[in-house]
Amino acid sequence: MAAGDVLAPARPEALIPFELQRRASQANLVRSFKLDEGLRLASLTLGPDGRLCATGVTDDSTCLQVIEPDGRVSLRKTEPREGNFFQAATLSRDGQRIYLAERRENRLTALDATTGDELWSAQHVARRATLCPAQENPDGSVYFTGTGFGSLWSAQGEFLWEHDQGDSCTRANAFRDGTAYQGGTLGLVAVREGKTVWKLPRPGDAVYETVDPTEDGAIATLCTPDVKRSRGAVQSIDDRGNIRWTREFPDFVTRPVLADDGTIVVVDAVGVVHALAPEDGSPRWTRNLAFVTASDLLREPVEHGYPVDPARDNQGNLYIGWDDKLHCLSPDGRPQGTIQLDAELARIQDPLLAPDGTLYLHSYPNQVLAIDTRGVLAFRSAARLDEGAAIRVSPSGVRIGGVQLPVRTPR
């Protein structure tokens, strides 16, 4: 399917048997729901049980909502906006608690996920910071972080330790197996029990943008700001802070996604997907999203925005948002289909992918779409659509070739 085609072919109905159309029209392929009227979404996270946590603000209040997989809001908590802002929220591993990051005094509050009652509250009094979604660890401890600081709290809300990096990026904060990683303009540090165990200095003008812990170290991305074009790099680091290898790119790159075999996948600013070998960073395969099929070679070049971080399902398929399109690639980089989002929807935000293949996208200010990616792509495959028959999703329906399917909304 062509990455840029949005019009149905001349005779698409002839390619789709009536019975297949009927079954697809009754399926739950796309669901759409809106959050509270007037709510401007600040954060959307996906829990291990498929529920969503949304935070945001209205003109006079800040709000937390827990959304069930069918779109129903099962919990709503609001406070006056003056003096506070619910910046992010995450569900615990067992789904029984919500960890709410509040701007007020950089506070972390644990709530009962059913009633919304406060269980405990932890306060990090520091300079004003942008807060990240908290992370619950297998032992029940909670890592709470933001720009410039990281802290660890027990399952009961007792303070364990904290570390002040001074200037770290929100996306370059991570925690695994007792080690916290903080990166930014001052370099990258690894911290255990509040003490630095190793530190990598900032390489030249580069800034550590993201860090993802692995079993034996971490994978980091760097960005070197430039007036004309920002350059990027991927770096593999062992558990002692030694750099195994660095692979540089002429453009900014996204946060990596790691395959089961260790393959590292990033997307650069011009839409090229790079799969790197974990041993030395050498290329395993590449795919240019601007030229997915032969017909793309005949099209005029298009000015694109930056791609968003790729998402990976439990079968290894990759989903990559770029402008108003969502590309699906197989684990070895073969195109599986492209979903075109209608112009009514905002540019794709970072997608949230549930284990069952449901992909959640939110558009500003308060629209959420849930797409059954496996169902949509399977329908296209079964219908034997040619590459010109695009899948197009709008708030009111989904069109696959010449077939208009309904979008379900919660009752």
Image (cartoon, grey):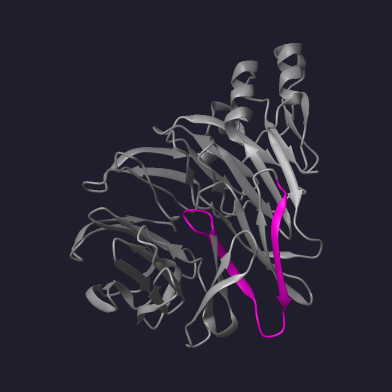
Residue 103 sits above or below residue 340 on the image: below
Residue at x-position 42% and y-position 34%: 333
Q: Position of residue 86 (x, y in %)?
A: 63, 72
Range of magenta residues: 71-96
- Image quarter of residue 275: top left
Q: Nearer the viewer, residue 45 or 395?
A: 45
Give the total of numbered labels.
0
Q: Please indicate, yes or no, whether residue 342 appears anywhere in the rendered image.
A: no
Residue at x-position 61% and y-position 53%: 52
Q: Is residue 76 magenta?
A: yes
Left or right side of 57 for 139: left
Left or right side of 117 for 393: right
Residue at x-position 65% and y-position 17%: 383
Q: Please indicate, yes or no, whether residue 245 appears anywhere in the rendered image.
A: yes
Q: Is residue 88 magenta?
A: yes
Residue 310 sits above or below residue 382 on the image: below
- Image quarter of residue 370: top right
> Looking at the rendering, in which quadrant would you find the N terminus?
top right
Residue 341 sits above or below residue 127 on the image: above
Q: Position of residue 161 (x, y in %)?
A: 34, 79
Left or right side of 366 for 299: left
> Looking at the rendering, in which quadrant would you find the C terminus?
top right
